[in-house]
Image (tube, rainbow, N blue to C red):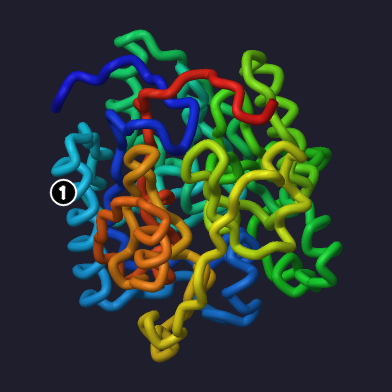
Amino acid sequence: MTTALPVNSFDEWSTLREVVVGRADHYNAHHVDASFKLFYFDNVAADTAAGQTLLTIPQQYVDELNEDVEGLAAALAACGVTVHRPSAPGKDVDIRSPYWDARATPALNVRDNTVILGDTIVETAPHVRARIFENDQLKTIFQRYYTAGARWVSMPRPALARGSLDTAYFDKQGIDVSAVMDADTALPIDGLDLEMIFDGAQCMRLGADVLVNAANANHRLALRWLGEVIPGLRFHLLDGIADSHIDSVVVPLRPGLMLLRAPEFLDYLPKAMQAWDVIYPPQMDESAFPDYSSFGFNIASRYIDMNVLSIDENTVVVNSLYPELIRVLEGRGFTVVPVAHRHRRLAGGGFHCFTLDTVRSGGREDYLS
C-alpha cells in the first residue's frame, strides 16, 4: 500500500489528497440491541426484531452494497486521490464485554469512529456496542500516519453498559424511550455516571473552527475533552441540531456556501455562518429508495443523500440516484462526480460517512471571523 503522508485535514472542501474508504465485507446483519435502537430511534421502532437480536440482510443487498462501495473507491482514485482501505474482517465475529455481547460491524462508516482535526487522528467513543472494535481494522493505516509524523489520540473508551446513554435529547423531543431502556439486556455498572459517548460525524470542520453537535451529557463530556486535548482549534457547540450526526443536516461545500437541510437549522449555526449562501436540497421521491419492509427497516433518514463528499471547492461526489441534487449543484457551477449508492438507508451512511479524509490541501484558516 502507498506510504501515507503526514495527516493534514482541517476542512471539508479543500483539495482532497488522501482518504480512507470503508469496507462492507461481512455487513450481512444488523445487531439490533438497545444501543442500536436508541441510536437509530428516528427509523427503528422499539418493537423491531422483538425476540431476536440479529436481523439478517439478504445476500443480494450485501453484494450490491459491496459493488457500490468499490465503485466509490474507484471513482476517487480516478480523480487522483490516494485511497486507503481498512483491513477486511476475515469472518463474522461475535464480541462481548463483561456487560453485553454483540455481532461486530465492519469498518464501513469510517467517519463515525474517527475525526481528523488538523494533524491529529482522534479516535472517538462509539454509541453502538457492535461498533466498539471497528477501528481495529484501521490501525495499520493510523500506524503509518503516526510513523510519518501525525498525532494520534483516543477518547476514553465507553463501557456502554446499561444506563450509559443520557436520554435528554429524547426527553426534549417528547420521545418516550423507556420501553427500549427497560428491555436492555446489558448489565449496569454500579456507581458509573454518564460517560463520554461521541461520534466523529458529530463534527464539521472549517479550518480554525469546528462545529460540534452536542445533544446530551455524553456529548458535552466529549466536547469538553476535545477542547482540552486539541487546544489549537475553536469548537462551536451546536446545541442539539440533531440527535448525533450532522453530515445530513449541514454540509459546508466551500467557504461561504453550504448545503442545509432546511431553514430552521440556520439558528443553530454560529452567527458568521448564518450569513453564508445556502443550497437547500430538493425533495426526493420516496420511490427512489429501495423498499426493505419485507425483511427489515431503514436505519438512515430520507435526507441521507445530502451526505456528499467534496474533492475540492468545485467538485463534489454525489449519489447518481439523486439527479435532483446533481442538477442543482451543476447549476451552481460544481463539477459533479456521480457514483451509484443504492443501499444508503440500509447501511446507514452516504459518501461522507463512508470516507475519512486524512490529507487535504487546506490549513487552519479563519472562515468565521
Q: Position of residue 147 (x, y in %)?
A: 31, 10
Pick whichever, 187 or 57, lies toward us.
57
Amino acid type, label 1? Ala
Residue drawn where x is 79% and y is 70% of the image: 178
Look at mark 1 in the image and give the residue it sits on: 74
Rendered location of residue 59, percent (x, y): 23, 75
Could you tell me residue 177's position as x and y percent?
76, 70
Q: From the viewer's perspective, tell me whether residue 81 is left or right of residue 279.
A: left
Q: Of residues 188 and 29, which is closer to you in this image?
A: 29
Q: Residue at x 36, y 50 (%)?
A: 354
Q: Position of residue 32 (x, y in %)?
A: 52, 68
Question: Relative to 308, is 81 above or below?
Answer: above
Relative to 239, say whether 296 is above or below.
Answer: below
Vertical arrangement, residue 52 with respect to residue 169, above or below: below
Q: Can you see residue 108? A: no
Is residue 53 visible in the rendered structure shown here?
A: yes
